[in-house]
């Protein structure tokens, strides 16, 4: 499954994703399940997993985080959601990725973005796409860390990063953190730069994070604490919780089928 895959619905696309997808996926043999309940979910060979981001003032594009077992299903979903407005489907797995547009249930070209584009880059847009802290690209760090890294000198930023990785991973050399990030999407790759450029042209800034895995981990823990406020936390749970403090503001939509 792809590490980073997001759909973006244009401001005039007011489709309710669960309502639009439910009957179509049910017809394909999928059923709704809840993996965040007390007993978890069933085991399925094919799944469609969505997190619908909360609407934010000033960021009218609706983001949907997506994880599917079959790549073709992702494009099928994008086509369904584009019947009432433009839908961007962007994905990146290490250095491989793509961005496609759909409108009226059909593939569209980039000219469809023209009404939504702005010449002004979003606040916090980093022009230096090759800036690094040590051997780690700044753009591969979490966005809040990027903001700090761009405000200080490289040596100061590297000390800050190492201090944080020691705190999170207990590894003085930060090897664990770097190994984890090696599997992250490569935003310096050609597909990564294309996606970033198009998002910048739309005036969007906070569009990359969280990724699906980070959000799912945070949502699972937040949901557990909501059910049982005194539940015991394991080492690392605090980090997962703090990674997405507003995880419960996202709407999960999970469907699966056994083949």
Image (cartoon, helix red, strand yellow):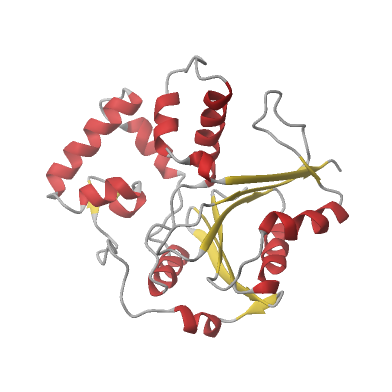
Residue at image x 64%, y 32%?
A: 36
In terms of image quadrants, where is residue 85?
bottom right
Percent across and percent down for residue 16 are: 66, 60
Instruction: Give the answer, above or below, for where 10 lies relative to 255.
Output: below
- Residue 254, located in which quarter of the rendered image? top right
Q: Residue furthest front?
A: 57
Q: Position of residue 44 (x, y in %)?
A: 78, 38
**Residue 173 figure quarter:** top left
Query: Residue 194, percent across and down?
Result: 44, 70
Q: Residue at x 37, y 79 (%)?
A: 118
How many numbered discs, if any? 0
Quarter of the image with the C terminus is top right
Q: Who's the residue at 72% across and 66% down the image?
A: 80
111 up-or-down from 89: above or below: below
Expressed as whole percent of the image width and height from the top left, the position of residue 225 reads 52, 24
Q: Is residue 215 left or right of residue 132?
A: right
Name the residue nearer the viewer: 135 or 246.
246
Q: Viewed as shown, does residue 115 lie left or right of 86?
A: left
Point 46% across, 52% down: residue = 185
Instruction: Using the image, determine if residue 97 lies above or below residue 258.
Output: below
Instruction: Work out whether residue 162 or residue 148 is closer to the camera in this orientation and state it.
Output: 148
């Amino acid at each position: 499954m792809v590490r980073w895959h997001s759909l973006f619905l244009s401001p005039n696309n007011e489709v309710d994703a669960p309502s639009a997808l439910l009957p179509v996926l049910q017809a394909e043999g999928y059923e709704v399940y809840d993996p965040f309940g007390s007993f978890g979910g069933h085991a399925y060979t094919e799944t469609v997993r969505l997190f619908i981001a909360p609407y934010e003032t000033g960021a009218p594009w609706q983001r949907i985080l997506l994880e599917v077992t079959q790549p073709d299903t992702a494009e099928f979903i994008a086509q369904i959601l584009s019947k009432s407005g433009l839908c961007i489907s962007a994905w990146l797995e290490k250095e491989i990725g793509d961005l496609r547009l759909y409108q009226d249930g059909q593939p569209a070209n980039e000219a469809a973005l023209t009404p939504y584009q702005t010449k002004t880059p979003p606040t916090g847009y980093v022009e230096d796409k090759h800036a690094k802290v040590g051997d780690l690209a700044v753009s591969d760090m979490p966005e809040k860390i990027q903001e700090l890294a761009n405000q200080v000198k490289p040596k100061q930023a590297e000390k800050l990063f190492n201090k944080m990785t020691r705190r999170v991973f207990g590894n003085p050399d930060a090897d664990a953190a770097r190994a984890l990030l090696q599997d992250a999407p490569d935003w310096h790759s050609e597909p990564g730069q294309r996606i970033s450029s198009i998002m910048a042209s739309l005036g969007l800034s906070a569009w990359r994070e969280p990724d699906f895995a980070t959000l799912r981990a945070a949502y699972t823990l937040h949901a557990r604490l909501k059910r049982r406020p005194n539940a015991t936390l394991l080492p690392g749970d605090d980090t997962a919780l703090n990674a997405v403090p507003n995880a419960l503001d996202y709407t999960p939509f999970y469907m699966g089928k056994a083949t």
